[in-house]
Image (cartoon, grey):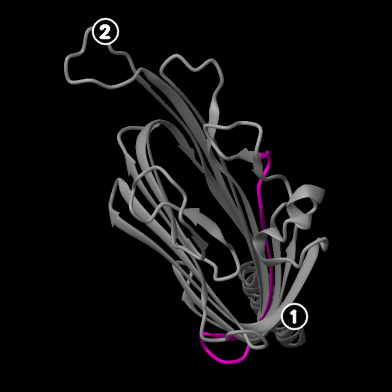
Amino acid sequence: MKKNIILVATVLLLLSVAFSQTTSLEKDLKKQNIDTTAQKSWKTGGVVSFNLSQISLKNWTSGGENSLSWNGLISLFANYKSGNSSWDNTIDIGYGLTKKGSDENFIKSDDKIDFSSKYGKKASKNWYYAGLLNLKTQMTAGYKMPNDSVKISAPFAPAYILGAVGIDYKPSDKFSFYASPLTAKTTIVTDKRLSNLGAFGVDSSKSIRNEFGGYTKLVLKLNIMKNITFQTKLDLFTNYLNNPQNIDVNWETLLSMKINKFFSANITTNLIYDDDIDIPQDTNNDGTIDKTGPATQFKEVFGLGITYKF
């Protein structure tokens, strides 16, 4: 009887030890799965916006013109993290048309494609060694209005392709600062007429211009209030081989104010300066072009319409 009691006690003790080890192993496996899930994940989202505005005047003594305009914006992102690696992808697409007065045709007011992909390996807490690829171009031809027969731009005329290797400071998903001392920038002008004119800095009769220099990119996203968000992107490039003191600037901002679930107001701005782009200018506002050369380009678009954020 005593032996049976000892045997039963021994079996119970072994089962207890085995059960506790199994439970501990299950906890370790669950913790490992949670850690793996946390380390490897995609984060995606974006904003789709469509805005429409219309002005109708009749016997209006203050003057003015009837107008109808619309513009759309798509801004998407897909970011991936796996251990010490990160891969951030964004694409912004914008397009708009405007019709004034008795004009039968719409004229373009906005047109852009901006794709960026950045891959990084963590160097320290918030610093990454990173490579970046960026493409900027447009979807349709642009004309020197009011003359709609003189084309001044076209799809891939220009297109800017930039490849860079550098470091990325990214303390959060809302802010990043990228700097590259080794950057290749290619300007493409596929339109034969524009390339023959040497437009956008390419040599006359050539369709490609290559530059080598330094590049900096800053991205900031803020939730100013519960229903107001602000985004800004600043790109700076200097060509080591030709006038490095002349810095190319591309600065974009988006202020979005949400009215309710679907309706919102958006303000977008875009400031560009490129020393290689010659722009006809009327310096004394007499209606005659008296100067051609580099100049600051600025665009502002305000829209009230439907916005879907996901």
> Which residue is nearer to you in this view: 48 or 38?
48
Whether residue 21 can be seen here: no
Q: Residues within 10 Å of mark 1 (few under 14, many from 20)?
A: few
Is residue 126 in the magenta section?
yes
Secondary structure of the residue carrying tag 2 is: loop
Residue 58 shows which numbered tag? 2
Question: As drawn, is 174 to the left or to the right of 75?
Answer: left
> Which residue is nearer to you in this view: 125 or 131?
131
Q: Looking at the image, which residue is at 77% across and 48% down?
A: 193
Q: Where on the picture, by quarter, is residue 79? A: bottom right
> Which residue is nearer to you in this view: 32 or 217?
217
Is residue 189 in the magenta section?
no
Q: Report the Cα–Cα distance between label 1 and label 2.
A: 98 Å
Name which residue type carries label 1.
Answer: Val
Residue 172 is situated, as x and y percent measured from the top left of the image, at: 46, 73
Image vertical order of residue 57 relative to residue 82, above or below? above
Q: Looking at the image, which residue is at 77% across and 56% down?
A: 195
Residue 11 shows which numbered tag? 1
Earlier sequence position, callout 1 versus callout 2: 1
Image vertical order of residue 212 relative to residue 233, above or below? below
> Which residue is nearer to you in this view: 125 or 18?
125
Image vertical order of residue 110 relative to residue 103, above or below? below
Foreground mark, 1 or 2, reads 2
Secondary structure of the residue carrying tag 1 is: helix
Q: Where on the picture, by quarter, is residue 21? A: bottom right
